[in-house]
Amino acid sequence: MMPTASQSNVLIPCPVCGNNISQFIMQVQDWLVTNQPFDLLACPACTTRFIYPIPSEYELSAYYKSPEYISHTDTHQGLISWLYQCARKRTLHHKKKKIERVTGRKQGHILDIGAGTGQFLATMKEAGWHVTGVEPDQQARDVAKNHVGIDLFPLEDLDSLSEKSFDVITLWHVLEHVYDLHGMMSRIKKLIKDDGLLVIAVPNYQSDDADFYGSAWAAWDAPRHLYHFSPHAMALLMQKNTFRIITKYRMPLDSFYVSLLSERQKNRFSWPRALAIGTKSWCTSWFNVDRCSSIIYFMRPEKGG
């Protein structure tokens, strides 16, 4: 791996805007697998944050090998995992309703990139949508097939899908994991219909829970989360790839879930503190979606883009 950044200003380009100078913010840690530290850098031009050094694509796979990585294993073990499963049942329904509300349609062709264990696609299929999903992790694909009867494709099959064939493309907490941001956006642009809807949900480091927990904020999730987007950075990334944001929604339960996970990474776990910080973050985001722990962005392709 490359050496860590040792100065506050470093000559490392931003993965979103290409600005050549980045700023060291703090060190964050892989709390799940290795306990390895990573530098967190910020672009002063577009406000994107990203870890450094970024492991190679080959190295990254090892950082996902944990029974506690719920989106791949679908585990119910442990209280926090159980709470995650309960919350997911509620959020899956809300995701479907939001997509139907924004698109104005009850069915169509939907592609989920980074589909995990297929729960979202199973919900959409049951509602009458034609579903397609890609997921790089073999274990997650096996769980999707065995548990919910959804056959997912490996990520390399994304380029074999028909161009301009999807009414909706979704990435639920996936873009922050994508190795080549602009390459992925280019592939999405080829697959989505000209009047299609792109839905991207990502953590938001400008939330109250991120401010409180600092380097212990669970959504840093280094090095699995390579990038971190402010609302400004997301808007710029979409603009550079000829998409426009048409609306944003909160993911309000994430404020509580991320606070609980963050407490596990402190020396003393406190349920009351997690509830208090989650509630504060939830209340703030009620009045300002740009302060929510996680934000869902709804986007359309720019005409002629």
Image (tube, grey):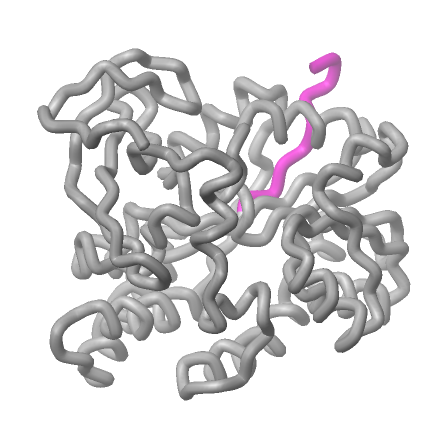
Q: Is residue 106 magenta?
A: no
Q: Is residue 28 above or below residue 179?
A: below
Name the quarter where the N terminus is drawn. Answer: top left
Along the line of sight, which residue is nearer the eye, 265 or 175?
A: 265
Based on the picture, tell me whether residue 300 belongs to the magenta stretch. Answer: yes
Q: Is residue 276 above or below residue 43?
A: below
Q: Which residues are magenta?
A: 297-305
Q: Tell me if residue 1 comes above or below residue 76 in the rendering.
A: above
Q: Residue at x 50, y 44 (%)?
A: 177
Residue 290 seen in the figure? no
Looking at the rendered structure, the number of numbered marks drawn on it comes to 0
Side (left or right) of 232 relative to 29:
right
- In the picture, measured across the screen, residue 184 lies left or right of residue 165, that is left
Instruction: Name the residue nearer the viewer: 52 or 190.
Output: 52
> Which residue: 82% across, 51% down?
132
Foreground residue among 286 and 3: 3
Task: Give the image quarter of residue 267.
Answer: bottom left
Splitting the image into 4 quarters, where does residue 299 fall? top right
Residue 228 horizontal/vertical position (percent)? 37, 40
Q: Residue 296, how many percent across, how many down?
A: 53, 50
Q: Look at 73% across and 18% down and name the residue there.
A: 303
Q: Is residue 255 visible?
A: yes
In this rendering, is residue 231 above or below 11?
below
Left or right: where does residue 166 sit relative to residue 3? Answer: right
